[in-house]
Structure formats: C-alpha cells, structure tokens
Image: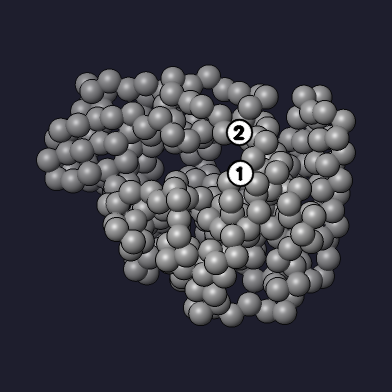
Amino acid sequence: MAVFTPLDAAEVDSWLARFDLGTRTDLQGIASGIENTNYFLSTTRGRFVLTLFERLQAGQLPFYLGLMHHLAAHGIPVPDPMPDRQGQTLHTLKGKPAALVTRLQGRSQLQPEPVHCAQVGHWLARMHLAARDYAGTQPNLRGLAWQTRTIPDILPYLTADQRTLISTELAHQTEVAASPAYAALPRSAVHADLFRDNVLFEGDTLSGVFDFYFAGVDTWLFDLAVALNDWCIHLQTGEFDAARFDALLNAYLAVRSMSDAEHRLLPDALRAAALRFWTSRLADYHLPRDAHLLTPHDPTHFERVLRQRIASA
C-alpha cells in the first residue's frame, strides 16, 4: 500500500455519499506498500479500507473484488468489498478506479513463530480449496510472461554476476513451465503475495488476510512457495528456519495433500517465487514511480533468497 493520489476529506465525503455506510469520522493515508493508493476510512457505521488503483485497469478489477467476496462467502477471513446503493463494488474516485472493503481486525506479526506459520499454512490450504469454484479467470500479472518482458529493462542496472544469475534463472523457470509435470499442477485463483505484512493476528490467532491485488490464476504450489519464502526464513541470510518451515507445510498438508509432482517441483517453485519478487523489487527500485508516501523494498533481499534456493536445490 502507498499514497500516490492524495485525497482531501471533502472529496471522500462526496464519494462516500453513494454508500449507505454513514458519514466519515476519520481518514488516514497508509504509507506501506508499493502499488496502490490506500486510506483507512472510518465512518459512523464501520471501519474500511479505501483503495485507488494506480496500475490495474477497471476491466481487471472485477476479478480481485469478486475473489475476495467469493472467499468471504466461503468463511475465509478476507476483506469483503462494499457495494453502493446500486449494488456496485467497483467505483471511480479522482479519475481512478476505486473500491471500499471491510477493514480486518488485528496486527501483522513480523517476527513469526511456528504457531503463526502453522495458521498461515492452514489458511492457505483452505483458501485454495475455496477458490476452486471461483469462476473468475485472470493470469498472474507478475508471472513468467511479465518477468520475461521486464528483466531486459533491468539488466543495465545490474552487475555482470547479477545479470548472469537473473538471466540463467529466467531460462530455468521457462524450461520448468514448459514441462508436462508443471502443466498438470493444480491451480486456481491464488493470493500470490502472502507475506507477513498481509496477514493479521489477534494475539496468536490469525484474524484475516488482505491485499489480494496481486492475485491471479496460478499453481497452488507457487502460492505455497511465496509463503514459505517469507514466513519461514531468517531475513538476514534467506535460509529456512526448519521449525517454521515444517509448521507451515505440515499445516497446509493437513488440509490438502500434495501430489508427488508437487513435492518434486517444490524446489523449483521456491526459486520461481524468489525470482518473481527479486524482479519486481529491482523494477520498483530502478524504475520507480512518484508517490507521496513510498519506500521501495530492498532488492538484495530476494537476491539472497534466490541464491540460497539454487544452492540448496
């Protein structure tokens, strides 16, 4: 989340009048994140998150909003998009596509223990099963096709060693994605960004997961790899913490068993997840957009993670 498009209270009050949600009592810009403009919006009838979409187009947004509503209806704790009096959840504010969703309770756990990782694994497996009958179809917009287009623009900013690493890994992932085993992996709409700062806890109990705006149809294995690469590592080195890794994976497997092919391809999926986020962080760092509140993430973190995954593979 970030603030690229500033809003004043009068603009928000005028826009909010189309909803049956009372009147504004508080409006605060959210500084974290890198993609959209976000505000905490409180009214006399509840607490919400207001998002203005800076990159996604209006035609893409029904997939995300529909997925959140689908999951919420299946009992998965996620933000639920709020309809206006005409029943619409996709809106326009200050010339940008906009949406208002419920604000979840809790706080992020940035130093997770196995108990937290186990709940993330349990939630993720439930989410995958619930998404099986979601009718929306949209590819992972930061998947291999996007990486193939973006990496050439990043190469001039990298050292020779980094250029070799990122180009070699892209070639490897392209080969994996063309294999029959990969084509047979189960897939549906996935979160694709299940990081520590996108999950909330009340005490040690998971209370909700948010930020579905990187979601897309992809393999469940990739989604699991994204979570393992963030929740179960030592941030300083990128190495896995065995207790947290086992807690997350075993909790996932307790809800949904994985095929032999998924077990075999997990090391490749962990590398794919590291490459995806190294690429996006490099792009955000070297090809930045202006924002009123924005600090790009450190690209070297996922370079370390990728090197660790290649070495351990």
Q: Residue at x 77, y 59 (%)?
A: 312
Residue 58 in picture, x, y percent from top left: 49, 39
> What's under tag 1, amino acid-wise?
Gln
Q: Residue at x 76, y 29 (%)?
A: 154
Residue 74 in picture, x, y percent from top left: 37, 69
Q: Secondary structure at mark 2?
A: loop
Tag count? 2
Discs 1/2, front: 1
- In the displayed structure, 207 sits above or below 61; it is below
The answer to which of 24 and 310 lies nearer the viewer is 310
Name the residue that disc number 2 marks: 298
The answer to which of 20 and 33 lies nearer the viewer is 33
> What's under tag 2, amino acid-wise?
Asp
Sequence order check, earlier mark of 1 and 2: 1
Task: Give me the disc on residue 236.
Answer: 1
Task: Classify the position of the C terminus by image quarter.
Answer: bottom right
Q: Residue at x 48, y 26 (%)?
A: 294
**Which quarter of the picture shows residue 280?**
top right
Label 1 vs label 2: CA separation?
A: 12 Å
- In the displayed structure, does residue 215 sit left or right of residue 301? left
Q: Residue at x 33, y 63 (%)?
A: 205
Rendered image coloring scheme: one colour
Residue 106 in picture, x, y percent from top left: 30, 51
